[in-house]
Amino acid sequence: MRIEKYLDDIIKKDGAAHLTLIDPDAQDPKVASDIADAAAKAGSSAILIGGSVGASGDVLDETLRAIRTATDLPTILFPSGACGLSRYADAVFFMSLLNSRDPNYLIINQMLGAKAVLEYGIEPIPMAYIIVEPGGMAGWVGDARLIPRKKPKLAAAYALAGTFLGMRYVYLEAGSGASEPVPPEMIGAVKSAGCGTLVVGGGIRDVEAAKAAVSAGADIIVTGTAIEEATDIQTTITDFVDAIKR
Ligand code: 1GP
């Protein structure tokens, strides 16, 4: 519970937390460690590591090892399957993609990876993962029956079901690089349905979108593309971190 408690303490203190998403397949490990260093200096709460395709094996391990040399910020795996696990991370979002049509993303990969999580000593954070239109690569790879943007009740019902199944975190995902983030009305519906810690990501490109998500009920904001595309990474992350503080 060390990382989960660390995040929950930040949320209690600051109102919300920011996670910097690094896709290990998007740059070499040295560049990833520079991004992690900037994230730490900017006040981001943790590094989230994952990607839908190619975020596994040596590149994942080497990226995590490089990040560890650059910063003490916790590293949390955000795997697309059992292949996205690494012994060099601190924790893993142990997710079930609740609106997938494919049992591989509901429970099979989790079954295949569970023993490694135990053996590596990484902390599993139980999470309901829900993908909303447009869904991007994660939606396609995970064969998600995408939640229509105008149907917040569907997202809320999935989140409540996940919560009843014991998932303490819910992640509402619009897909990396999405043209529009998750609608605030949907975030509000999920939060007021009574879920635990609510993570929101996908298409959050500016501080206004981050602020809107937190005002609607998000506890944690994830940004990846906005950081990858930034010319000044530290300033960009600082702006997100400052914008979501209470
Ligand atoms: C993707 O929610 C994350 O899984 C982050 O999305 O790359 O659009 O910030 P972005």
Image (cartoon, rainbow, N blue to C red):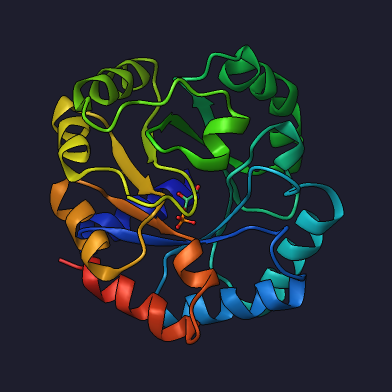
Please identify the quarter of the rendering in which residue 184 is found: top left
Is 153 on the left-hand or right-hand side of 76? left
* Depth check, front residue: 37 or 187: 187
Is 42 on the left-hand or right-hand side of 137? left
Report x, y in % for residue 56: 77, 47
Report x, y in % for residue 244: 23, 65
Q: Is residue 17 visible?
A: yes
Report x, y in % for residue 58: 86, 55
* Depth check, front residue: 242 or 103: 103
Please identify the quarter of the rendering in which residue 94 is found: top right
Which residue is drawn at the image coordinates 61% and 53% (left, top)? 90
Which residue is drawn at the image coordinates 27% and 56% (left, top)? 11
Which residue is drawn at the image coordinates 56% and 18% (left, top)? 106
**Quarter containing the C terminus:** bottom left
Figure disc tally: 0
Q: Is residue 124 visible?
A: no
Is 40 on the left-hand or right-hand side of 23? left
Report x, y in % for residue 16: 26, 58
* Depth check, front residue: 70 or 203: 203
Q: Indicate whether 35 appears above or below 187.
A: below
Which residue is drawn at the image coordinates 26% and 69% (left, top)? 207
Q: Indicate whether 238 appears above or below 154.
A: below
Q: Indicate whether 118 appears above or below 4.
A: above
